[in-house]
Amino acid sequence: MDPFKVLFVCWGNICRSPAAECVFQKQIDEQGLGDQITCDSAGTIGMHAGQPPDARMREAGAKRSISFFGRSRKFRPSDFNEFDLILAMDHSNMADLQASMPIGDSKAVLGLFGSFVNSEQPMEVPDPYYGGGGGFDVVLDMVEEGCRNLINHILER
């Protein structure tokens, strides 16, 4: 059986979606689920293509023993048929994805990552790029919780 493939998508693919990818990968590895679940991340714009995750996000992650890896890439139309689940970090990202969906069948189901966060937080994962350092911790709090719930969701399917 092929692994279940998840793609996390934000605007530039340097803060929120790589955070989700790295946290999710860490949790997958810790649970020994690497043969059952895989993940990647992308952005709806290509402005940061090839860049590593934002240094402030990497710093916030290091305080939680989260290793950041990868380079930014722009979302590709082929992602609709490569992934089983594509999760947008906010409604704007979701609208961009919906606008680029191919006509006809696609393998992927679209959703909001925030739907996996069981807290008082909004359904959108806030973009910390232009805010202060505390925004990166808020994002990581949401991402850690959401990734745990997402793994449970996938395993229950």
Image (spheres, rainbow, N blue to C red):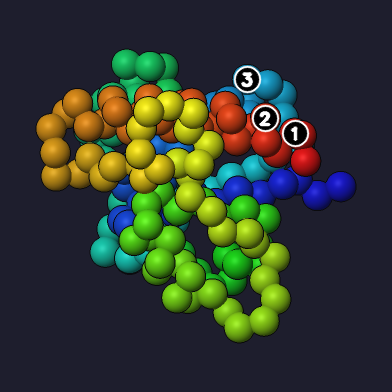
Q: Position of residue 1 (x, y in %)?
A: 86, 47
- Compare residues 94 and 76 and report the one nearer the observer: 94
Q: Are marks 1 and 2 in contact (CB under 8 Å)?
A: yes
Q: Which mark is drawn over residue 155?
A: 1
SS at mark 2?
Answer: helix
Q: Position of residue 105 (x, y in %)?
A: 70, 76
Q: Which mark is drawn over residue 28?
A: none
Relative to 110, is 107 on the left or the right?
right
Relative to 59, is 76 on the left or the right?
right
Graded by Cα atoms within 10 Å as few (under 14), some (14 to 19) or many (20 or more), the crowding at tag 1 reads: few
Q: Quadrant of residue 114?
A: top left
Q: Is residue 91 above or below residue 103?
A: above
Return the residue at label 2: 152
Q: Are marks 3 and 2 in contact (CB under 8 Å)?
A: no
Considering every residue shown, the one lying at the far bottom of the view is 103
Disc 1 residue type?
A: Leu
Return the residue at label 3: 30
Q: For the point 23% across and 40% down, which residue is it?
A: 128
Q: Position of residue 11 (x, y in %)?
A: 32, 57
